[in-house]
Image (cartoon, rainbow, N blue to C red):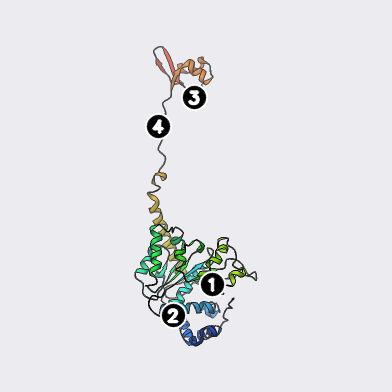
Amino acid sequence: MTVPLIDKCDGDFRKVCEKYADHLKSALGKRREAFIDWMMLSKDYSESQWKQGMMGDPFLYLHCFSIYNKLRGGSNQHHIVLVSGKIGKGKSTLGAQIAALVDPTLSMERICYIPPHFFKRLGISKAAEGNLIDEGGNFFKARNAMTTLGKDISQAFQLVRDLQQLIVVCYDEPEKLDKDLIDKIDSLFVKVYDPDQNGDNKYNGYYAFNVKNLELVKPYLKKKLPIFSKECQQHISWRGRNSKEMPKINDINEKIYRSEKRKYLKDHMVGLADKYAKEYEDKLQPAPEQPKLTPEWVTVTQASKINSCNPETIRRKIKTGILKYKKIGNKYMVPKELPDFV
């Protein structure tokens, strides 16, 4: 199902909300007014988006509205969203948009780039908060089931249910996640990293579907192929579009987001350098200088045969002081391997 963009509404945000509700009339039923009231919470989400008709698609808002109500509907409710796609194709932007719609109090401190940051956030989180794991490779690419980090991450994902959290994970290789984590994920967004069916290379959209259908999509993700097969499309909830803007809410904007991301990643690199410094200490040190071997001494006659030269030449070099020698009794001894000048 392809979702059209909402047109501009003369700068009247409530009209935007009503248009979204009209698109979702059959799905919302009696929840229409509640949906509009919820959308009104996002008025300052990013003005330029809705004024240009680029706020997103109605089904994305319906999805976030459902999560919003789910987290506030009782104890032990959670939702984990996985956003996938090639590097640089807008995973972080879409992930932040989803998190900001579900949690209007989202701030930079809840965007996590490294595991310690994520663990700390869960430790001080409140019910119904949203957290975004950006750069999921820092969490999962080194995640083997038996590693300490792997076990801790798995345990953290188990706890989000009791903590009533929304967790949005941006990760470029979901096909490599193990079943233990896949089972905890509720919905999957795959960023389009190829032209759409009309040949538009600038298409900025995604496929969204239940994570249980990840098995259908895995072969396409592994080969970096477009997810246009009929088999996949039959199980996909919708195909939507979103803007390229990072949400401008609270202390979040594009500049601050990029600055904080660089800071955390630089700190992460310093931490990795310290972690592996000891392991590679011996390899990073210069190789010890090899001791010089003492030449093996032979007689002049033996040296002439070994080096294929005239004995008289060797004797002449000895007398002129050019060639090193030892004298044992009345015999001259010279190195077994003579220098090139002899």
The mark tally for this picture is 4
Of the numbered discs 4 and 2, the one sitting upstream in the chain is 2
Kind of residue indicated by mark 3: Pro
**Quadrant in which the N terminus appears:** bottom right
CA gap between label 3 and label 4 equals 19 Å
| Residue underneath mark 4 | 291
Q: Quadrant of residue 26?
A: bottom right
Instruction: Identify the residue under disc 1.
Output: 208
* Nearest to viewer (mark 3 / mark 2): 2
* Residue under numbered circle 2: 69
Q: Badge 2 local density, few (<14 within 10 Å), some, or many (20+)?
A: some
**Element class at badge 4:** loop
Residue 41 point in image, percent of width and height: 45, 82
State how far apart marks 1 and 3 are (Cα): 77 Å
- Identity of the residue furthest to the top in this view: 330
The residue drawn where x is 41% and y is 34% is: 290
Label 3 and label 2: CA atoms lie apart by: 89 Å
Location of mark 3 (residue): 339
The nearer-to-camera label among 3 and 4 is 4
- Residue 306: tell me if it is visible: yes
